[in-house]
Amino acid sequence: MSVLARSVGNAFRNKVRTAAVVAVLAVAIGLALAMLVANQAVAAKVQELNASVGTVLTVNPAGGQGFEGGGEPLTSAQAVTAAGVPNVTAVVGTKTLRLRNATEAAAQAAAGTQAGPGGGQGGPGGQTTTLTTSLTAAVDAGTLGTRNQASSGTTGTTGAATQPARTLPITATGIGAEVDSAGKALELTEGAGLGNYTAASTKALLGTTLAEKNNLKVGSTFTINSTKFTVAGLFDAGTAFGNNALYVTLPAAQTLAELPGELSTMIVTVNSMENVDSTKTALQAAIGSDKADVTQGQRNLETAVSSLDSVKNISLVAFLAALGTAGLIILLIMVMLVRERRREIGVLKAIGARNGTIGLQFVLEALVLVALGSVVGAAIASFASGGIASALVSSGTSTTAAARRGAGVPGGAGFPGGGAGLPGGPFGGASQLLTSVTASASPGVIAAGIGAVFGVAIIGALVPALLTARIRPIEVLRGE
């Protein structure tokens, strides 16, 4: 009988014990693989944060941010100046519009209410322009929307008269590249982009829920004021608020607003994180501190990335601990088997079997058990890795948020504090990135983890295999 066949047969000699050993190994291996997958997922998230936000600077008008504040609008000429600053690789200008449903606007006008936020064209802080559209918002106003609109003077009152149904405004952003308002690449789910984002166009990209609400698809049309736009593609921003939006080219938005050359914000990308601080200073000086405020997404993310690095280290330590546990289990099992089979080993050595052959038999038997445990462990990891990664990240970011609140740092309620001028949690516009860690048990990661497990198993099996060399046939046979 070959060594391999004898090893497989020995592995199943005691089926109850084999099942118990495989179950224990499966738990240890499954935990090790899940921690490895979580480690890879968190490492990828840190890389994504550094790449998409860590090197992005946002330029707002001095004294204004989002829908708040005042000051003078930015201009396309300032975007050219920003592009000439050393270490700047890209400058994307945006122009923000707020769209009100045309039917609702007409009903409000008939009821004597205000035309829109801020009284029409200007908008709050001069940052937005309110226009009418054939679209209906995908997000219901609800209690918060109704309260916010009333407090900002959106609808006004007409005594006891019945008010028209309120809907939320739709955010339309004219942008100079295929990125979102925070500088991240738009994730298109259908259709194509707008082509040349620096040229006038009547094409638009719609959020998936906004398109669904209005029964639109790629190729459908809608209107903004009297201009007809065609849906070129659909995108998924990952949030209900983000999907209640649309994008057009920057010149198209400037034309709709009748404000050529005016920008709401500029998204500036720096060539590396090491140059962010110096570039921020140079950019502020080039445009003028009285003309623009330059905010740095990296500052809002330093603590967040630090917490994610801690999570990554914890998952790595947990992986090594689970891996060591699996190796220890193999070591103990094989030591027990060597002691049980002393007579069998003595007989084999008496009839001429070499120590290497007998040791290989025990190593192969251990690998059979590990292979069975790895199959079950991989299944466990595929189901558990996502939950483990989310729990680790949630715990890490919650602890960081609590620390920030304890230090008196604003939690991002409203627009202040977000690196891109967006509302969000304790890390401003990066909150969605932080909480959207996706752990997928990719074949490569699983294969690497199982390879490490097999390596540890071989080491654990070699120790008892070496013990076979100390067994002398005459001593075993004399004891029988």
Image (cartoon, helix red, strand yellow):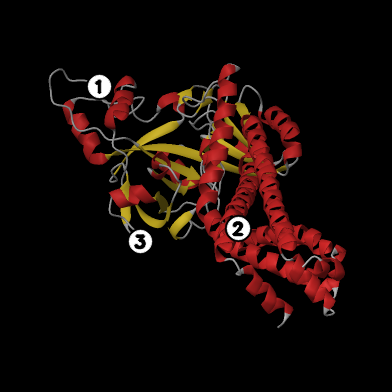
Marks 1 and 3, the one that precedes in the sequence: 1
The amino acid pointed to by label 3 is Gly
> In the displayed structure, would residue 350 be above or below residue 136?
below
Residue at disc 1, secondary structure:
loop
Q: Secondary structure at mark 2?
A: helix
Mark 3 or mark 2: name the one nearer the start of the chain. 2
Percent x, y for residue 205?
A: 42, 52
Q: Give the image location of residue 414, x and y in percent.
A: 46, 25
Q: Nearer the viewer, residue 151 or 225?
A: 151
Residue 172 in percent (x, y) is at 41, 42
Asked if residue 52 lies left or right of residue 187, the reply is right
The residue positioned 75% from the left and 32% from the top of the image is 278
Residues 205 and 174: in front is 205
Res 445 seen here: yes
**As drawn, 186 above or below 356:** above
Distance from the alpha carbon under mark 1 to that under mark 2 = 72 Å
- On the question of residue 442 being in view, the answer is no
Amino acid tagged 1: Gly
Is 184 displayed left or right of 469 in the figure?
left
Residue under the point 76% across and 65% down: 342
User: From the image, which quarter does the N terminus lie in?
Assistant: bottom right
Q: Closer to the camera, 379 or 3? A: 3
In space, the residues marked 3 and 2 are separated at their CA atoms by: 60 Å
Image disc number at residue 156: 1
Q: Residue at x 56, y 26 (%)?
A: 401
Task: Compare marks 1 and 2 and give the one earlier in the sequence.
Answer: 2
Camera-near label (3 vs 2) is 2
Residue that numbered label 2 is attached to: 21
Q: Which residue is mark 3?
A: 219
Circle 3 SS class: loop
For residue 199, which numbered disc appears in the image?
A: none
